[in-house]
Each structure stands twice: as C-alpha cells, then as structure tokens.
Image: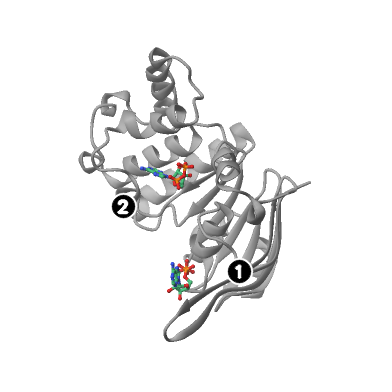
Amino acid sequence: DNILEVRNLKKYFKSKNGTLHAVDDVSFSIKRGETLGLVGESGCGKSTIGRLILGLHQATSGEILFNGQDICKMKKAQIHDLRKDLQIIFQDPFASLNPRMSIGEIIGEPLLIHKKVKRRAEINSEIRRLMDVVGLSTRFINSYPHELDGGRRQRVGIARALSLNPQFIVCDEPVSSLDVSIQAQVLNLLKDLQAEYGLTYLFITHDLSVVKHFSEKIAVMYLGQLVEIAESDELFKKT
Ligand code: ADP
Ligand code: ADP
C-alpha cells in the first residue's frame, strides 16, 4: 500500500548560465506508515523533491502520486486541499514561523484557513490540545517565536503541521539547526507521533547519523539523481 509514488520526476532550473538538473529522473515509493530517509550532500536536490511533493514547485516532468492522485497535475485549489493530508516541517523553524504571530496564532492558522474549526471559541482549546500533543507548555501560547529556544520552536512547527491531522509529513532537515542534545528529543517526539497517528514521513537530511536510527529505508541522492535505495540495515552493513 504505497501512499506516495514518485515516477521519473524531473525539475530543471533555467538561468542565464544554463539549465541546472536539480532533480534528474528520480523514482521511489513510500508505504503507508513508513519513514523513507532521503540523504545526500547539500545541493543534491533533496529539498527540491520535498517542495515538489508539497506542490510548491512545478515539476519539469514526471508524476507524484499521492494516494493515487498526481500532485503534478493538480490546480491551486486542489493543492490547497491537499494540505489537510500532506504537510511539511522545515529546518529552521525561526525562518519559517511568522515572527509577528504568537505561538497560538501560528498553530491555529491552518485551522482557520481550512475552516477545520467552525467556532472561534473551539480554536483555543484545539491549540492547547496540539501544544500538549507536542510537549509544549501552554504558558507559551501568547509568546512569539524569538522568545522560544530552538527545540520549542520546532515543537511549534510540528504542532502546526499536525493541526489538520495529516497522513504524510515531509520533514526537511527538522533537527539540523538544533543542539545535539535537543535533536534526540525532537526525533523521539516525531517517532512517538508516527506511532500514535500512523504518520508517513519523508525524512530529508544531510546527516546520516540522524536517519540511521529513524528510517527503515534510505534513499541516497547525488547531483540530482537517486543513486541507491535500500533498507537501513543493508546500507549500513556495507559502509
Ligand atoms: P538540497 O536540499 O539537497 O541541499 P536543493 O534541492 O535545495 O538541495 O537544491 C538543489 C539544486 O537546485 C542546488 O544547486 C540549488 O542551488 C538549486 N535550486 C534550488 N532551488 C532553486 C530555485 N528556486 N531556483 C534555482 N535553483 C534552485
Ligand atoms: P497553504 O496556505 O496552502 O498551507 P503555503 O504555501 O502557505 O500553503 O505553505 C506551505 C507549507 O508551509 C504549508 O504546509 C504550511 O504548513 C507551511 N507553512 C507556511 N507558513 C508557515 C508558518 N508560518 N509556520 C510554519 N509552517 C508554515
């Protein structure tokens, strides 16, 4: 049961210096409830794949089937609806969280945009529930992103991503900007949430030690191409 199937995906960026093959004929699939680690050096095309899956880039060619529906063919309104099932967590939550919005507003915004909660009064209790789910004290509800440390900020990003109850989350370097001691806490949280909600993850990272214990399967990229895809155990036996 594949929740995601990427087929012959290409994304070329044109500039005055020529054409960059950022994603060059990549194919892979992810089973429901699984984590696929997507690894490779900086600049090899990992984030571009993440953004293509979110519908934030237009693919040059290829297919991205999510529950059998091709994201590459979707119109804006369908991409918008897709957010209920497919979310993203970014590397540096400080850069991705709106600095002018309170923590409560950031977590509650998708609920408002997607009208998941009908009454304003319900929103507050839902925001508090989500903060609880990610282990963030509700005393931060009126704080702003810059007032939180990196680990708590990432919990805000996770709570926001969870707010619409998605099936699939692209985790794009979710712990790379955090202290090593905090990394383990956030990874454990992601693991617990996966078990509890049956989430599927595409886990993007340049750090092999991070995915090693997190992903049962790992895809390795090099210069826009997928050069290997293997069970984590297999891959680490060889190296
Ligand atoms: P990674 O996530 O593996 O670090 P990226 O997917 O961010 O790699 O980038 C892959 C390549 O595509 C890089 O050479 C990067 O400079 C280029 N690239 C990414 N986004 C754009 C863009 N919007 N316009 C032009 N080039 C881009
Ligand atoms: P949409 O409005 O349809 O959710 P966007 O293009 O605005 O799409 O956002 C793309 C993704 O980035 C969404 O999945 C959203 O959760 C995430 N995102 C956007 N803004 C923020 C933010 N301020 N904090 C955290 N995540 C955000």
**Residue type at tag 1:** Thr
Q: Which comes before the other along the chain, label 1 or label 2? A: 1
- Where residue 60 is drawn, which disc sits there? 1
Give the residue at the far left of this rendering: 147
* Residue of label 2: 95
Answer whether labels 1 and 2 touch (C-beta < 8 Å).
no
Residue 143 at x, y percent in the picture: 23, 32
Residue 188 appears left or right of 221: left
> Which picture quadrant has residue 149?
top left
> Which picture quadrant has residue 180?
bottom left
- Quadrant, the C terminus: bottom right
Residue 225 at x, y percent in the picture: 62, 75
Residue 180 visible in image: yes
Residue 133 visible in image: no
Residue 237 at x, y percent in the picture: 66, 70
**Residue type at tag 2:** Ala
Secondary structure at numbered mark 1 = loop
